Image (cartoon, rainbow, N blue to C red):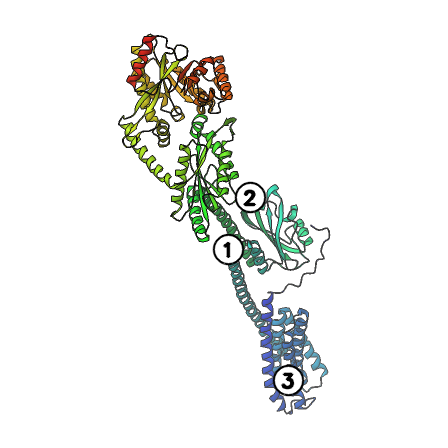
Amino acid sequence: MTAETPRISRPPRRQIGDWYTDEVTALVETGLRQLRMVSAVLLFPYIIRFRPGPDTPDLPVNQWTAALFICGALALTNVLSLTMERVSSERLRSFAGFFGLAADTVVVLLIVQVMPFFDHNLIWFILIIPVMEAGMRFGLAASIGTWVGLVGTLYLGETVWDRRTNMFDNGQLVLQRLGLVLLVSIPAVYLAQKLLLDIRIERRATGEAIRRSRLLENVAHASQRISRLDAGMVDEVLDSAVSLGFEVVDVCVKGFGDQWRLESARQTDPSISLPDPEAEDGGLQGVAELEGTILYHEGQDRDTDTILRQSGLSAMMVCPLGTEGDATVALRCGKRIGSRITRTEAECIELLAGNATIALHNKRLVGELRGMQHRLQHQAYHDVLTGLSNRSHFIELLDQTLIQARENGHRCAVAFIDLDRFKPVNDSLGHDVGNELLIAVARRLVSSVRDTDLVARMGGDEFVVLLHPVFDEDDEELTEVADRICRTIAEPFVVSGNEVVISCSVGLAVSADDVNGSTELIRRADLAMYRAKALGKARWEVYEPSVDEEGVSRIRIETDLRRAVANDQIAVEYQGIISVRSGQMIGAETLLRWNHPVRGPLRPDVLVEIAEDSGLIIDLGQRVMEKASCHLREWQDRFTERPPLVAVNVSPFQLFHPRFFTLLDDAIRDSGIDPGGLIIEITENIISAGDDCETLLHRLKERGVKLALDDFGQGQTSLRYLRRFPIDLLKIDKTFVQQGDKDPADRAILHSIINLAHDLGLVVIAEGVENLAQLRLLRELDCDLVQGFLLHKPMPPTMATEALARTRDRGRVSLGA
């Protein structure tokens, strides 16, 4: 509200029927003009031909002058009536009406009193004309007043005018004639008023219907524009409200904090305004809870009158438009002082508000639908866990990039990334930690590539990168990206308080003329990735045509291996474990052997990798465990005095598999072995899995088996795990053994590892002994057990049995000077 109160203009005089009254008045005027014209046409020849007789006095002027005067007065009255129709002033039109009535009355008086054209009996009926005219113009009271004035004027005229006969001579006849005039005039006036009223009502209804039709048409057009749901919807509502006849309109919004604010407004008169929407008297209090329209108007109560007059308004409508998001929307419409809100306007504004409410609701639904479509599209093309592009999106973009590269003469490349040692982490620390690790890997990959490259997740622990543009296989930028990826992933991760170290193998494939599509390019990158794994992992390799043959061979080997496991065609050999002090063979390590029908014997590391990738590792490991258990039972039965030990390697995939302990229990039970003679060898990457691994190792110890940590020194095992976990034996990686007699640093590492193991109460096994120098060094460093080609090559079970028998028959054996 402003402090200054605007000046209130005086409302105009209320008309009978607004603009319809002018039309009815024009109809009356038209009838009177026609009556004057007919009267002039009839009187003019009558007056010209008038001749005074013995009973009629002479005219005061000649016949032509009298005719021109009377007919001219009638004509001038008609001209004045026509002129006043074009005048907008109500006062002038009222004055013209009085003047016309006076003129017509004077003409009648002249005809009756001064110019005796007619008989006295006819004169009384001529008096009816001005009486009825007054009634039609100004009502019954004016009709009676005109009648009294005419009679009084005639009586005075008859009294002072010297005439032979007086029409008031016979009193009884005069009363009859006066009554007859009233008897004819009053019903005629009533009938005329009734006729005019019917005309007014009919014209008003017709006009209202036309106006209502036009307003509804405006609302319909506005609703069509509003239903477009574009940014100009609020402006369309405001413009439509103004077109319905409101001088000031606005749209207000209540958002956070339950505070109303003005969104947009329109006004045709700067002297009026709507109340402040934030004020208590702004008309918006409680509008959010209403389902209908609030109408404020003059005369409602004193407070409302004060509020409206301060804003220069006579009425105000408030229509709730529903909600848009978390906001409430309302439409306010005002009328200036002196005008009113008609029922048609109110209905049209409510209809407009209803359409706007529906439009807002539809807009919200459309927004929600578009948001849902966007989310669905994002889910369809992006990985839910990492937010990266998924396989389908990557393939689609790769196809487009291949087409563009071919058209522009450029090339693109695909880097296929597979995480090394991810499965043990996922199985040991849980899937939640595994998911966090994948998310962290995704972030590092994005930070390692160029801005023009695209990172996607193919599924599981496999990622791909679209590298574009590149120019050839020797592009330095291509290899730099691959190096950055390998280095970045090799850095330790901290997930859920656990430090995790993994690596990745990367395969690179560059588009060429013989690449038919995305599938072929991804296949080549995948084959290159497998080559990187076969060459030691944690590295990258570029696709070469020879890799195709390797890939095909790998698939064939996997098929043949699956058949061999099912048909029990897997064999084992043993490599003896020798005591450094006694020289006796105290046990043997179980080695996997499979003689491929075409390729011959395959390396155990190749078999294990293929088995892990294909899911055969559980069945393959079960075969090995069953055979080792049977041979251990045979040796325990034969060599009862000092039963030998048998070591079996267990991969992380086996240890973390739900069936592993069931299969191990079955093997121990079915073979009937003493589990104390079974050594389970695990690698360092299992140890790094943390608490979950500790639980699994304790479950192994509960079964009475011994635990050996294999390839110690190759990984990044924390030394605190050696103290915490129930390890019995520590196997030193062969790289330190084979370099210990040559490199002082490796000798120092060997010495430290052996002393540390002994301090922790562990038995030390050194593997990979290939010459006497290495053996002498291990004896000097007080190593407990050794194995290697110098002492025993891998041998079939029968030869291993014979070797065990020989060492026991000879007692202590010398291992060399």
Which circle, 1 or 3, is nearer the viewer? Answer: 1
> Where's residue 169, x and y in %?
66, 81
Tell me the SS state at disc 3.
helix
**Given the image, on which type of amino acid does mark 1 rest?**
Arg
Residue type, label 2: Asp
Identify the element where label 1 is drawn: loop
Mark 1 or mark 3, which has the lower sequence index? 3
Q: Position of residue 372 (x, y in %)?
A: 47, 44
Q: Which mark is residue 326?
A: 2
Nearer to us: label 2 or label 3:
2
**Which residue is disc 3 drawn over?**
71
- How many numbered tags mark residues here? 3
**CA gap, disc 1 to disc 3?**
67 Å
Q: Residues within 10 Å of mark 2 (few under 14, many from 20)?
A: few
Q: Where is the C terminus found, in terms of image quarters?
A: top left
- Judge by depth and name the residue closer to the eye, 29 or 715: 715
Q: Earlier in the sequence, mark 1 or mark 2?
A: 1
The amino acid type, in three-letter code, at marker 3 is: Cys
